[in-house]
Image (cartoon, rainbow, N blue to C red):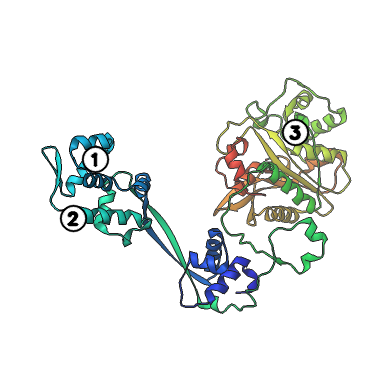
């Protein structure tokens, strides 16, 4: 045990109890020997020494008997039976009638009862006693008993104790804990040099840092593993904190962030991504179409390029979807159903500049709310456009991202999206189970060529709330959006 780990009061107390190795020191002895007034200092120091195994504490709780209200009166004026007995002995006419005149009703009644039990009886209205010595002796014993209080229960005469317990308000019992300390072998081995008291610093102040004193100061150590109360203070919502962490992670991985509107056209949200116009996801149950704006403009050359691709595959070698195609459908306003609508527009504006961009943003789908679904949620979207970008790079990027987010076990499975080939699904291992977090793939030529892109583009879109559920250990997604203060306070700092 190093000396500097001891607090000053512990040092002083250890020095004292080292003075007699065999002795168990009481609180009073410690206070005196350490020259302390405050019991709390001694008890805390004793506790500290015991935790460090330098001392042993022996705790005994005992019952103390002390005077109650009537008992304190009796000390001042005498016990009721003593006062009555004195009166009987000193009056010529010890009759019940006279007694009632000399004592109040509330004393006379119970008092006579007490005397009777001591052997005083009433004959024709007069008090008579068989043996005055017996009465004197018993009253003396009782007076002595209460004069000796407070005292430990076990040190008292059992019969008298029973007697006083049966009387109202004379005595009461309290449980007290007393401690005794003795030095252990380890405690005795602490050198007197280590017991040298020093000025100990428990708070670092600017003054201290500005002076030179901090260099040689002794610092109080704190056990940060001890339980403590948590101060409630303002902080970011866990979702916001998670979004910040995702941002930081992508920025660290060399990505830049894009932010765009969530009011978009069906053209950019779907046609640009080669989602056929008769795709079921376009139906009202999945997409929130808007009345205002019901329609938004898209440059005619882009509309034409999509139409070409959808009807016959354009110059990509694809046959397209065939069937019918409408520019009016493309112009319809909607709330974006995925953030891929933003990355594809970024590419259309920057078709020949290698890039790594990401977005963490809100999307909307007509979903029934349940444990794992919300109609408004967030996606973690990203693309890498780079010469030579390939599937391996995509998988590595996603694995790296999830590992940085605290999910090291990631696997991918084949999947299908109309706009990527190959397509994959990303799953993360959580509590022994694989959970699907999102989709990814390499944009098809039907997507890139109409925009004039010739470099491969890796793309992904992941659910943020799903990840939040994993990170925060939730089994109901709705918990994230109800303002449950108790829950919010107890969330980890992300
Ligand atoms: N947009 C897809 C979704 O919403 C995810 C995805 C993005 C898939 C990019 C492949 C490429 O689920």
Q: Which residue is mark 2?
A: 134
Name the quarter showing ligand 1. top right
Mark nearer the N terminus (3 vs 2) = 2
Q: Give the crowd class for mark 2: few <14, some 14-19, many >=20 residues within 10 Å.
A: few
Mark nearer the N terminus (3 vs 1) = 1
Task: Tell me where residue 446 sits by quadrant.
Answer: top right
Task: Name the foreground residue: 78 vs 431.
Answer: 78
Label 3 – label 2 distance at C-alpha: 110 Å
Residue 109 drawn at (x, y percent): 23, 37
Task: Tell me where residue 323 sits by quadrant.
Answer: top right
Label 2 – label 1 distance at C-alpha: 20 Å
Task: Name the foreground residue: 242 vs 200.
Answer: 200
- Kind of element beneath mark 2: helix
Label 3 – label 1 distance at C-alpha: 98 Å
- Quarter in which the N terminus is drawn: bottom right
Residue 305 drawn at (x, y percent): 83, 33
Residue found at x 51% / y 78%: 185
Above or below — where is 301 with respect to 479? Answer: above
Q: Give the crowd class for mark 3: few <14, some 14-19, many >=20 residues within 10 Å.
A: many
Q: Which residue is mark 3?
A: 269
Q: Which residue is mark 1?
A: 110
Residue 129 drawn at (x, y percent): 14, 48
Above or below — where is 210 with respect to 67? Answer: below
Q: Give the crowd class for mark 1: few <14, some 14-19, many >=20 residues within 10 Å.
A: few
The answer to whether residue 319 is seen in the rendering is: no
Q: Nearer the viewer, mark 3 or mark 1?
A: 1
- Kind of element beneath mark 1: helix
Residue 230 located left or right of residue 445 = left
Question: Does the beta carbon of the residue at mark 1 sit less than 8 Å from ligand 1?
Answer: no
Residue 43 drawn at (x, y percent): 52, 62
């Amino acid at each position: 045990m190093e000396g500097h780990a001891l607090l000053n009061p512990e040092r002083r107390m250890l020095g004292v109890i080292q003075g007699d190795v065999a002795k168990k020191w009481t609180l009073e002895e410690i206070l005196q020997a350490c020259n302390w007034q405050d019991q709390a200092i001694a008890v805390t120091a004793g506790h500290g020494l015991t935790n460090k195994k330098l001392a042993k504490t022996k705790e005994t709780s005992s019952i103390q008997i002390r005077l109650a209200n009537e008992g304190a009166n009796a000390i001042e004026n005498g016990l009721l039976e003593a006062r009555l007995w004195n009166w009987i002995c000193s009056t010529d006419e010890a009759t019940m009638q006279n007694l009632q005149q000399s004592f109040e009703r509330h004393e006379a009644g119970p008092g006579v009862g007490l005397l009777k039990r001591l052997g005083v009886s009433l004959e024709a209205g007069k008090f008579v006693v068989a043996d005055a010595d017996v009465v004197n002796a018993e009253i003396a014993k009782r007076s002595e008993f209460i004069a000796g209080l407070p005292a430990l229960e076990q040190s008292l005469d059992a019969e008298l104790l029973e007697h006083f317990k049966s009387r109202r308000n004379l005595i009461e019992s309290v449980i007290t804990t007393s401690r005794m300390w003795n030095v252990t072998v380890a405690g005795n081995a602490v050198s007197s040099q280590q017991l040298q008291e020093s000025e100990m610093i428990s708070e670092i102040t600017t003054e201290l840092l500005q002076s030179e004193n901090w260099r040689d100061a002794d610092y109080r150590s704190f056990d940060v593993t001890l339980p403590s109360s948590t101060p409630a203070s303002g902080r970011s919502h866990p979702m916001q904190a998670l979004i910040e962490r995702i941002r930081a992670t992508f920025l660290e991985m060399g990505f830049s962030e894009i932010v765009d509107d969530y009011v978009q056209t069906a053209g950019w949200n779907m046609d640009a991504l080669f989602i056929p116009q008769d795709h079921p996801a376009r139906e009202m149950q999945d997409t929130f179409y808007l009345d205002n704006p019901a329609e938004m403009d898209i440059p005619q050359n882009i509309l034409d390029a999509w139409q070409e691709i959808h009807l016959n595959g354009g110059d990509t070698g694809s046959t397209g979807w065939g069937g019918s195609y409408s520019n009016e459908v493309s112009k319809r306003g909607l709330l974006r159903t995925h953030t891929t609508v933003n990355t594809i527009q970024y590419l259309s504006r920057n078709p020949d500049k290698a890039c790594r961009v990401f977005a963490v943003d809100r999307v909307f789908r007509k979903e029934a709310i349940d444990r794992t679904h919300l109609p408004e949620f967030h996606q973690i979207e990203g693309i890498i456009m780079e010469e030579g970008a390939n599937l391996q790079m995509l998988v590595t990027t996603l694995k790296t991202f999830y590992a940085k987010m605290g999910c090291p076990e990631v696997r991918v499975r084949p999947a299908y999206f109309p706009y990527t080939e190959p397509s994959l699904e990303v799953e993360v291992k959580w509590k022994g189970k694989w959970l699907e977090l999102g989709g990814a793939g390499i944009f098809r030529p039907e997507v890139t060529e109409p925009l004039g892109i010739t470099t491969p583009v890796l793309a992904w879109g992941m659910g943020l709330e799903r990840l939040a559920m994993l990170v925060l250990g939730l089994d109901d997604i709705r918990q994230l959006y109800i303002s449950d203060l108790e829950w919010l306070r107890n969330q980890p700092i992300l």
